[in-house]
Image (spheres, rainbow, N blue to C red):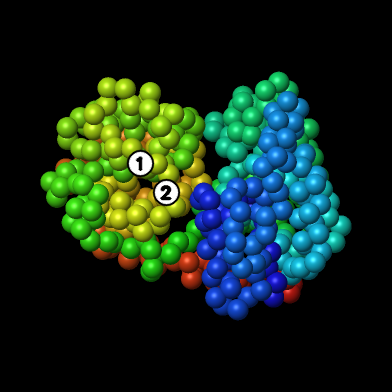
């Protein structure tokens, strides 16, 4: 069986890490697995090919922002990708994030539809069934056509024109022309939303994201980790991880206000921080910032030493960082947005009303003070291993590949 995954990045960011995990696990199991990606760092790894380049992405981004059309440029990269497909002849194409200025999406789907190649598409956000938005927040225009978009300047942004109605119609035409498609969402929330869209004609399944719960994300020795990174056993530590602190969707302001509210009660560690955001820290003395890192063991040690992990996103699917924290035994506090609540149910953490600063800070304080009835560290880690292991996720995808390649359906 030949499987080709397509994504914007490889091993950079949440969705890309899922792609990487699936690919490596499939190779271990003897499956002929390939990954084609369009942007980011060049990765020298078995079966991995980059079809785009920085110049093409930048030009595509410029044209997209000027015209209001996202995913209608970068023909050169898409032609290169199609050549990869023709040479490899995959039994199933597994798509992930197609937006991000690395593809001419209509060209790709015209090819897939013409050749009736079976596909699986994992939705890491809502872009595929909206006129443009990655997340639609409180807007429901995506259900019947978009247009007059209230979030036209959100990623992928348009500077001048609202082309969302035309893009929605074109997406519906392209994406519903196949008889051999299956949509997967990592959260039950996004699965149900997808069923309400034009993708409802296809099987829509939930497969939770998996991580390496055996070799990387497991509870490390808390005292050793604290000593290594300069924290005492008495310190209360709140941890947040993101790469887009300026993005309002990520909710950095809620973490920073919580840091202000906590004062000397706790130290707030923010990983993925860029120094250009330092102005946001004015007046805060209890915040420790750390640049973005690819060191997974370091991340696991920080998850393990923290008393609580916070995810204040105002829109989210099924956050990989949340799984990583839970796998390391650390409770999580987040908003009840998207798929976050289902990650935190049954004693795994606390979800509070979206955007409620007081409730968010209070939940963090309750965890720090031991005023909750959450699962123990060991119980939380064990449950995550059972639900979110790489082996479980890859096995579910593998069965799906087999079903759709042999029968064209599930």
- Label 2 neighbourhood size at 10 Å, few (<14), some (14-19), many (20+)? few
Q: Where residue 286 sits in the image (x, y, percent)?
A: 23, 33
Assess whether mark 1 and mark 2 are in contact (beta carbons under 8 angstroms): yes
Looking at the image, which residue is at 40% across and 57% down? 296
Quick one: 288 or 109, which is closer to the camera? Answer: 288
Q: Where residue 26 sits in the image (x, y, percent)?
A: 58, 72
Looking at the image, which residue is at 72% across and 41% down? 56
Q: Is 178 positioned to the left or the right of 102 in the image? A: right
Q: Where residue 177 sits in the image (x, y, percent)?
A: 81, 52
Looking at the image, which residue is at 43% across and 44% down? 292
* Residue denoted by label 1: 290
Quarter of the image with the N terminus is bottom right
Asked if one can make out residue 298 in the rendered structure from this viewpoint, the answer is: yes
Q: Which mark is residue 293?
A: 2
Taking 139 as reference, is 6 above or below it?
A: below
Q: Where residue 299 sits in the image (x, y, percent)?
A: 36, 53
Quarter of the image with the C terminus is bottom right
Q: Is 64 positioned to the left or the right of 319 in the image? A: right
Question: Extreme left residue here?
Answer: 234
- Label 1 neighbourhood size at 10 Å, few (<14), some (14-19), many (20+)? some
Q: How many marks?
A: 2
Quick one: 50 or 338, which is closer to the camera? Answer: 50
Asked if one can make out residue 188 in the rendered structure from this viewpoint, the answer is: no
Q: Helix or strand or loop: what does disc 2 sit on?
A: loop
């Amino acid at each position: 069986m030949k499987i080709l995954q397509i994504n914007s990045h490889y091993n950079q960011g949440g969705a890309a890490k899922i792609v990487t995990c699936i690919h490596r696990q499939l190779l271990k199991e003897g499956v002929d697995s390939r990954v084609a990606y369009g942007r980011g760092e060049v990765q020298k790894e078995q079966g991995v090919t980059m079809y785009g380049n920085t110049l093409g992405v930048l030009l595509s981004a410029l044209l997209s922002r000027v015209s209001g059309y996202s995913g209608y440029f970068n023909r050169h990269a898409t032609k290169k990708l199609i050549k990869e497909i023709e040479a490899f002849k995959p039994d199933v194409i597994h798509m992930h994030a197609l937006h991000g200025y690395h593809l001419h999406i209509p060209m790709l789907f015209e090819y897939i539809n013409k050749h009736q190649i079976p596909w699986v598409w994992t939705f890491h956000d809502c872009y595929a069934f909206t006129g443009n938005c990655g997340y639609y927040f409180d807007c429901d225009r995506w259900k019947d056509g978009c247009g007059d978009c209230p979030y036209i300047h959100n990623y992928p942004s348009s500077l001048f024109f609202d082309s969302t109605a035309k893009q929605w119609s074109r997406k519906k035409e392209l994406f519903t022309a196949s008889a051999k498609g299956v949509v997967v969402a990592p959260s039950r929330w996004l699965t149900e939303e997808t069923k309400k869209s034009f993708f409802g004609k296809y099987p829509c399944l939930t497969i939770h994201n998996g991580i390496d719960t055996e070799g990387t994300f497991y509870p490390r020795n808390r005292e050793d980790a604290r000593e290594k990174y300069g924290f005492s056993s008495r310190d209360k530590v709140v941890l947040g991880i993101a790469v887009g602190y300026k993005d309002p969707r990520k909710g950095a302001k809620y973490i920073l206000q919580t840091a202000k509210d906590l004062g000397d009660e706790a130290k707030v560690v923010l990983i993925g921080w860029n120094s250009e955001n330092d102005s946001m820290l004015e007046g805060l003395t209890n915040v420790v910032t750390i640049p973005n890192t690819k060191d997974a063991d370091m991340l696991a040690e920080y998850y393990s030493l923290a008393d609580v992990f916070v995810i204040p996103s105002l829109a989210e699917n099924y956050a990989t960082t949340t799984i990583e924290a839970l796998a390391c035994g650390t409770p999580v506090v987040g908003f009840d947005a998207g798929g976050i609540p289902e990650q935190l149910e049954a004693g795994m953490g606390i979800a509070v009303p979206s955007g409620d600063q007081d409730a968010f800070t209070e939940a963090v304080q309750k965890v720090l003070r031991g005023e909750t009835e959450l699962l123990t560290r060991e119980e939380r880690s064990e449950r995550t291993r059972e639900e979110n292991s790489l082996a479980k996720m890859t096995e579910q995808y593998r069965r799906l590949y087999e079903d759709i390649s042999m029968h064209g359906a599930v």
